[in-house]
Image (cartoon, helix red, strand yellow):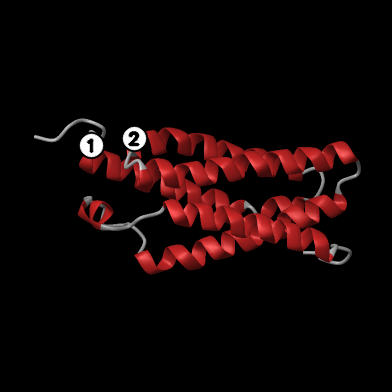
Amino acid sequence: MDLAGIETRILLMAGGAAVLVAVLGGYATETGAWYQALRKPSWQPPNWLFGPVWTTIFALAVLAFAMGWRDAPTPEIRMAILAVYGVNAVFNIAWSFLFFTFRRPDWALAELVLLWLSIVAMIVVLWPVSRGAALLLAPYLAWVTTAGFLNRAILLLNGPFGKPGP
């Protein structure tokens, strides 16, 4: 991974954006009584793992962005990188609101498909510019894939959602 030539301001701006996404997603993530009462599959990762994994994913995404920005041959490609990251940020935050704030794992699962596709789009846009940057997003794709299976399992174990209780 070649980090030479990455401007500090790009790292700071990308890092700031990642922190904003993390804070907004964290704001929406309430793991109180409702979440604790949900039946979850036995293979769910332990709760303590989520923070370190997301921190790592965001750090790798920042590095990937900075590498792609540095290596982009044209302003149009830089704008494409910025656009796919922006779309991904919206979908990342939206999932937390749908699942935790609105308590709709069914809607969150549908939206997670868009989140997953946005990660694929980030990889596709970065690949011709910097394969190393694109590969840094592989853990993000793997984690969101795992989250999708977990979201689906929670939906199957607890659904339907959005219907009035007895």
Please identify the quarter of the rendering in which residue 10 is found. Answer: bottom right
Q: Position of residue 90 (x, y in %)?
A: 57, 41
Instruction: Give me the residue at 52% from left, 53% from top.
Output: 24
**Residue 136 visible from this viewpoint:** no
**Separation (CA) of disc 1 from disc 2:** 8 Å
SS for tag 1? loop
In this view, the residue in front, 87 or 132, is 87
Q: Is residue 35 visible?
A: yes
Q: Quadrant of the N terminus?
A: bottom right
Q: Residue furthest left?
A: 166
Q: Nearer the viewer, residue 162 or 38?
A: 162
Q: Name the disc covering residue 46, or none.
A: none
User: Does label 1 or label 2 sit earlier along the sequence?
Assistant: 2
Give the amino acid at mark 1. Gly
> Alpha-carbon neighbours of circle 2 within 10 Å: few (<14), some, or many (≥20)?
many
Residue 118 position, x and y percent, is 60, 38
Q: Are marks 1 and 2 in contact (CB under 8 Å)?
A: yes
Quadrant of residue 73 within the rendered picture: top right
Q: Nearer the viewer, residue 55 or 103?
A: 103
Read off the residue under disc 1: 159
| As drawn, 97 above or below 9 | above
